[in-house]
């Protein structure tokens, strides 16, 4: 299931963006609270784009725009 235009989401509290959709995946960076990010896809983990970097965060940390 692909989304042509990425949705926008808001980070609820500072969260570590990871290289993959699992707790043990390498940490890439921390996304600050109240940041708007592009949401590529969301199941239990959301794939997001932040500052041009793609990564994963746990769904409960993001509020989707829809």
Image (spheres, grey):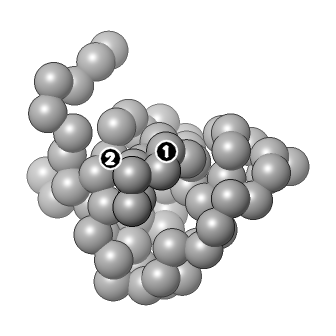
Q: Is residue 22 left or right of residue 42?
A: right
The residue at the far right in this view is: 24
Q: Write the residue at 60% across / 60% down.
A: 17
Q: Write the residue at 43% across / 84% down.
A: 33
**Visible residue check, residue 27:** yes
Q: Is residue 54 left or right of residue 19?
A: left
Quadrant position of the N terminus in the picture: top left
| Residue 64: % across, % down | 26, 58
Q: Is residue 41 left or right of residue 65?
A: right
Q: Which residue is mark 1?
A: 54
Q: On screen, 14 above or below 58?
A: below
Give whichever of 51, 9 is nearer the camera.
51
Q: Write the residue at 19% across / 46% down.
A: 7
Q: On screen, 23 above or below 4?
A: below
**For numbered disc 1, what is the local secondary structure?**
strand
Q: Which residue is mark 2?
A: 39
Q: Write the residue at 60% across / 74% down.
A: 30
Give whichever of 21, 28 is nearer the camera.
28
The residue at the far front in this view is: 52
| Residue 57: % across, % down | 56, 55
**Visible residue check, residue 46:** no
What number is the disc on residue 9? none
Give whichever of 54, 45 is nearer the camera.
54
Residue neighbourhood size for the residue with mark 2, other residues' Cα within 10 Å, grouped as few (<14), some (14–19), many (≥20):
many
The residue at the far top in this view is: 1
Q: On screen, 61 above or below 50?
A: below
| Residue 52: % across, % down | 39, 52
Task: Please tell me which of labels 1 and 2 falls first in the chain.
Answer: 2
**For numbered disc 2, what is the local secondary structure?**
strand
| Residue 51: % across, % down | 39, 61
Q: On screen, 20 above or below 50?
A: above
């Amino acid at each position: 299931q692909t989304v042509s235009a990425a949705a926008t989401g808001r980070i609820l509290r500072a969260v570590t963006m990871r290289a993959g959709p699992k707790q043990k995946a390498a940490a890439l960076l921390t996304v600050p609270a109240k940041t708007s990010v592009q949401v590529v896809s969301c199941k239990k983990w959301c794939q997001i784009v932040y500052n041009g970097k793609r990564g994963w965060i746990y769904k409960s940390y993001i509020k989707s725009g829809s």
